[in-house]
Image: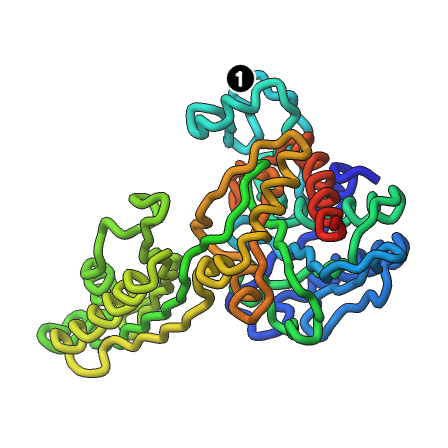
Amino acid sequence: MTAVERFMKYIAYSTASDEESTDSPSTARQLTLAKALRAEMEELGLENVRIDGCGNVIGTLPATEGVSAPTVAFIAHMDTSPSASGENVRARQVLYDGTEIALGHGVTLGERQFPEMAALRGRTLIVTDGSTLLGADDKAGIAEIMTMAEKLLSGGTPHGELRIIFTTDEEVGRGIEGLDVAELGCDWGYTVDGGALGSYEYENFNAASAKVTIHGVGIHPGSAKNKMKNASTIAMEFHGMLPDNQVPEKTEGYEGFIHLTGMSGDVVTATLHYIIRDHDRALFEQKKAAVRGAAAMMDIIHGEGTAEVELRDTYYNMKEKILPHMHLIERVEKAFSDCGVTPRAEAIRGGTDGAMLTWEGLPCPNLSTGGYNFHGVQEFIPTDALEMMPEVLVRLAAGFAEK
């Protein structure tokens, strides 16, 4: 089965995670895909395939007989972002000629909005119908890893032992729940969860989430003067105290942000949800301090107990843990080059399961899937990138077995 065929099969599964859920996995629908992947892995010939208590699928591709090499993990995640619907994905293939693509539902895709598409003219793209995301993040990674495994099993390329891992809940920052690095028994790892073909990443944001609850006082509006404390109004005042230039829509590259992802409320209670990101640890801590400072100011202005802040660190920049093991990056560059793909390092404006695994003791850079515009209805992936990445992964796996 080709990577494209696998991808089209996997995106039929609705697997969005839920950041409000305390279950593991956060949504039961992820288990449906997990069971299908377990069956496919067993059919291919992987060994010790299992689904753990958090829904992660783990299997082993044994080393070629006589090969002594490090054990390497290849990892992708099954869930899709809850930022856009993943229900009833209707994908189609389009030969892109530079003309704006009408996806449907009033949504278009083209170079006016995404100038980087100019380099994709003449290539076939898998696109949505404009009503859902596509699911390339990260079902493309799953398809590419599975196709790599099939190629290694049938092609006779020497390789060491490989651990194939498909995780749940990566999109809500819980992607390594249930995984024990010591139990996995891997020396090195790679996530396949990146963007355009040829990109690789070993720098990512430090990340935290913040929930700010504003407590107000409800009084009948007819007699509210000097008595009412409108929580929704105070919430807007709180947000206005944060740096207005440190938001995703005004930052790029290594610039961090404080991103308001949701808000709700009434007169009595209002809630704001933020994610906080920065590559630089000191600047990351400053951004968290800005949130705490704004809350303290609300207490000064409106009375003690007005603003309540819950801050939680999610993951950290993997760079300092990867630098002592730069052979992992050199191997990636060689694998891409051997396949005729120009490698290029990028800094992730986000995070991966690999970032958290790296801090748990399993160095784990991130590799491209070939996809674009993740988390939205304009997500797409070129078919040739889907088919090239398994070749890159085969080359990468084989490289660890070479003397």
Compared across the picture, whether 8 is left or right of 343 comes to: right
Q: Determine the residue positioned at 66% across, 57% down.
A: 75
Quarter of the figure with residue 154: top right
| Residue 16 showing in the rendered view | yes
Rendering coords of residue 372 (x, y %): 54, 38
Relative depth, front residue between 103 and 229:
103
| Residue 379 showing in the rendered view | no
**Mark 1, other Cα within 10 Å: few <14 / some 14–19 / many ≥20:** few
Type of residue at label 1? Answer: Thr
Relative depth, front residue between 105 and 144:
144
Which quarter of the figure is the N terminus placed in? top right
Q: Determine the residue positioned at 74% across, 37% down.
A: 4
Rendering coords of residue 167 (x, y %): 66, 62
Compared across the picture, whether 374 is left or right of 233 comes to: right
Q: Secondary structure at mark 1?
A: loop
Q: Determine the residue positioned at 31% across, 45% down.
A: 251
Compared across the picture, whether 164 is left or right of 17 comes to: right
Quarter of the figure with residue 160: bottom right
Rendering coords of residue 101 (x, y %): 55, 24
According to the image, label 1 marks what residue?
99
Q: Determine the residue positioned at 54% across, 45% down.
A: 200
